[in-house]
Image (cartoon, rainbow, N blue to C red):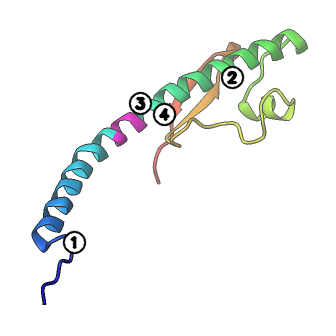
């Protein structure tokens, strides 16, 4: 009685697992590198949005806001405003309406 079962041998499965492992080792560092780049670009875009809202606030009320909280209370920014994507940088409004990025110090 001859059996004609088609399937993978143990060696074939190990080769497939090896190939998948190598692909994961190559792609994971690239994904994290791109994630940092995306966060930097997102923070820059968020900073420009806050700068535009500071200018709108100044045109409407004749004075510059002193903080992000003031812009949120006046409904120039959404309630969850304040930080950049990634969570390690926040946006700060300085004297004269200057908008800067500030690193958040760890505990």
**Residue labelled with disc 1:** 7
* Residue farthest right in this picture: 61
- At a point 21% along the width and 56% down the height, the residue shown is 21
Q: In the image, 61: left or right of 70?
A: right
Mark 3 closeness class: few <14, some 14–19, many ≥20 residues within 10 Å: few
Q: Earlier in the sequence, mark 2 or mark 4?
A: 4
Q: Earlier in the sequence, mark 1 or mark 2?
A: 1
Q: Earlier in the sequence, mark 1 or mark 4?
A: 1
Q: Secondary structure at mark 1?
A: loop
The numbered dot on residue 50 is 2
Residue 54 position within the rendered picture, expressed as x and y whole percent measured from the top left: 74, 18
* Residue farthest front in this picture: 1
Tell me which secondary structure the magenta stretch mostly adopts.
helix
Magenta-tinted stretch:
31-35
Q: Earlier in the sequence, mark 2 or mark 3?
A: 3
- At a point 74% along the width and 25% down the height, the residue shown is 66
**Residue labelled with disc 4:** 39
Q: Secondary structure at mark 3?
A: helix
Quarter of the image where the N terminus is located: bottom left
From mark 2 to mark 3, how far is it between C-alphas? Answer: 20 Å
**Residue labelled with disc 3:** 37
**Disc 1 or disc 4, which is closer to the eye?**
1
**Disc 1 or disc 2, which is closer to the eye?**
1
- At a point 67% along the width and 21% down the height, the residue shown is 49
Return the residue nearer the eye: 57 or 10. 10
Q: In the image, 96: left or right of 33?
A: right
From mark 1 to mark 2, how far is it between C-alphas? Answer: 60 Å
Residue 101 position within the rendered picture, expressed as x and y whole percent measured from the top left: 54, 27
């Amino acid at each position: 009685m001859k059996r004609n079962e088609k399937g993978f041998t143990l060696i074939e499965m190990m080769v497939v697992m090896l190939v998948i492992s190598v692909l994961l080792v190559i792609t994971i560092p690239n994904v994290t590198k791109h994630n940092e780049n995306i966060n930097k670009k997102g923070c820059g875009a968020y900073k420009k949005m806050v700068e535009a809202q500071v200018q709108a606030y100044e045109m409407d009320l004749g004075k510059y806001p002193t903080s992000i909280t003031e812009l949120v209370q006046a409904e120039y920014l959404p309630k969850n405003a304040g930080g950049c994507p990634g969570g390690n940088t926040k946006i700060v409004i300085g004297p004269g309406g200057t908008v800067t990025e500030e690193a958040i110090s760890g505990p």
